[in-house]
Image (cartoon, helix red, strand yellow):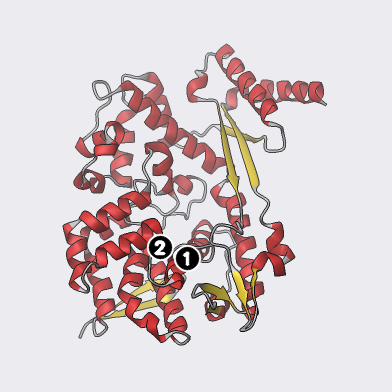
Amino acid sequence: MSSRTYFDPLHHSITLNNINPEEEMVMELIDSSPFQRLRRIKQLGPAYLTFHGAESSRFTHSIGVFHLVRRALNHLILIDPSLEKHKFILYGAALLHDIGHGPLSHTSEEIFGIKHEDWTAKLINSSQEIMVILNKYGKNNSKQISDLIKTRKSEKKVIISLISSQLDCDRLDYLMRDSYTTGTRYGQIDIDRILSAMTIAPDGDLAIAPKGLMAVEHYLVIRNLMYRSVYNHRLNEVCNWLLKKIIQTARSLGPKIVWADQGMSELLWNHEKMTLDSFLSNDDIILGYHISKWQKSTSPNLSILCKRFLNRHLLKALNLSYLPIEIRLEILAKARKISENNLIDPDISCGLREQMVKSYHPYKYGLRLWDGSKLEALENVSPLIKGLIEPNESSWLIYPKEIENELLSEIEIIKIKTN
């Protein structure tokens, strides 16, 4: 018999014991090279340039998700003992749900145009190392787990909801973890109350007992605040914009001008046919190395962008969310013109970053309250949750510091004209 314990800053001791075959499988998966790669993928992408403590990895987060799934399932088994046989599938999906992330996590999806769910499914179905471990503990485990992650298919609805819903264990862990590492205080979720309030509705799907309503309301408010204060923070938007410009510029220059190793070359110019080995060779360290090399590129634009990012010489950002889209575009055009007049290339210094976030979507795996006799949608019993359905829009104008005074003066003129 062997056991191991991961000491987690949020969940404290997470202990695995091979006396339980499903936990033995988890230990083997953690030791696999595709999972160990997640140590080299930052959970919050470039947010460490805004929040200096945001250095946590996808590795740490994934173990946290497994831990919450194990807690939730052990609670729900008391309600439906037949869930016991789904431990292998659920534990595997919880642990592996993020192995398809590219460098800097979600930032990769925007800058390289890849979907982490697709690569997660590919790795689970095609990586010999992962497949051998999964299928050793059950025939077709790898296919069932990839189906659960990518297409939300499973025998049990409640299993799907623990992995992918508006109250899944992934969201619960990342909200707490991201709040902790960024130093914000919004993510103080009452996780014990939420897990203990989880129940199973008559249709077999996840529901919340009335005692957990306030804890879930609090969780959804926290999600709203975390998007506004962390994920869509103005400097985080600037960093993501810079990274996107770096990759766009490198791609447009092509492999004859821009040096890249084989894995990065495929990610840049042939990602649709990228091999598993090439995908796995890319992580934050490799991307950082390439950006460092590109500082000395013969392309002035690529060099400037890379130096800005690496040395944190960030551009400015101004909130334009309160203005109509046509006014935002007019201001962007004005910023580009002023930049040109100041001999600053607007293509690498001016832009708009626009995001739309809905804190709660009643029609996308919405939550229900079940009191043992009546099943109701949460938004019908909670005015607070109903208010969170309205989407939040953010729009940041990105521009160089050198034009700030002139730009702000021009914006005031534009606003006076439109009033």
The three-letter amino acid code for the residue at tag 1 is Asp
How far apart marks 1 and 2 lie (CA) works out to: 7 Å
Q: Is residue 246 visible?
A: yes
Residue at the image point whose x is 24% and y is 49% from the top: 280
Tell which residue pokes out farthest to the front in this image.
203
Quarter of the picture containing the C terminus is top right
Residue at the image point whose x is 34% and y is 27% from the top: 250
Q: Are marks 1 and 2 in contact (CB under 8 Å)?
A: yes
Q: Which mark is drawn over residue 173?
A: 1
**Left-right relation of 270 to 231:** left
Q: Which mark is drawn over residue 339?
A: none
Whether residue 164 is situated above or below residue 207 in the rendered picture: above
Nearer the observer, 316 or 258: 258
**Quick one: SS at disc 2?**
helix
Location of residue 55 by image quarter: bottom left
The three-letter amino acid code for the residue at tag 2 is His
**Left-right relation of 19 to 249:** left
Nearer the observer, 75 or 102: 75
Q: Position of residue 143 (x, y in %)?
A: 27, 62
Residue at the image point whose x is 36% and y is 71% from the top: 90
Q: Mark 2 or mark 1, which is nearer the start of the sequence?
A: 2
Whether residue 224 is situated above or below residue 406 in the rendered picture: below
Q: Position of residue 299 (x, y in %)?
A: 35, 19
Q: Which mark is drawn over residue 61?
A: 2
Location of residue 186 by image quarter: bottom right
Q: Position of residue 195 (x, y in %)?
A: 52, 77
**Quick one: SS at disc 1?**
helix
